[in-house]
Image: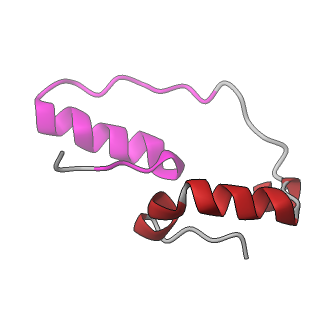
Amino acid sequence: MDYIGRFENLNADFGTICNKIGIETPDLPHKTKGDGADYRDAYDQANRDLISTIYQEEIKLFDYAFD
């Protein structure tokens, strides 16, 4: 694997992947949008701890945080 795209940059990163493999980049419609609320507010401390444990490697790799 030589490229990892981020969901939060889906359109741009998908375009990069399409270019790398030599295909035209199709439109990716945004059909379901959130209400704009901060996703971190949906997690209590127990869930944050669980997710932090399960996805520890990805959180570090992408520099994610709950704060």
Q: Nearer the viewer, residue 16 or 6?
A: 6
Q: Residue at x 61, y 61 (%)?
A: 53
Residue at (86%, 53%) from the top-left corner? 42
| Residue 22 to residue 9: above or below | above
12 above or below 56? above
Q: Position of residue 25 (x, y in %)?
A: 29, 28
Q: Is residue 62 magenta?
A: no
Q: Which residues are magenta?
A: 4-30
Instruction: Say whether residue 11 is magenta.
Output: yes
Q: Is residue 40 left or right of residue 59?
A: right
Quadrant (top left/top right/bottom left/bottom right) for the C terminus: bottom right
Q: Identify the residue shown where x is 38% and y is 46%.
A: 12
Residue found 78% across the figure and 40% down from its top = 34
Q: Position of residue 27 (x, y in %)?
A: 42, 25
Which of 10/3 is in front?
3
- Measured along the vertical axis of the image, is residue 16 above or below residue 39? above
Corner quadrant of residue 45:
bottom right
Whether residue 38 is visible here, answered yes or no, is: no
Say which of 17 and 39 sits in front: 39
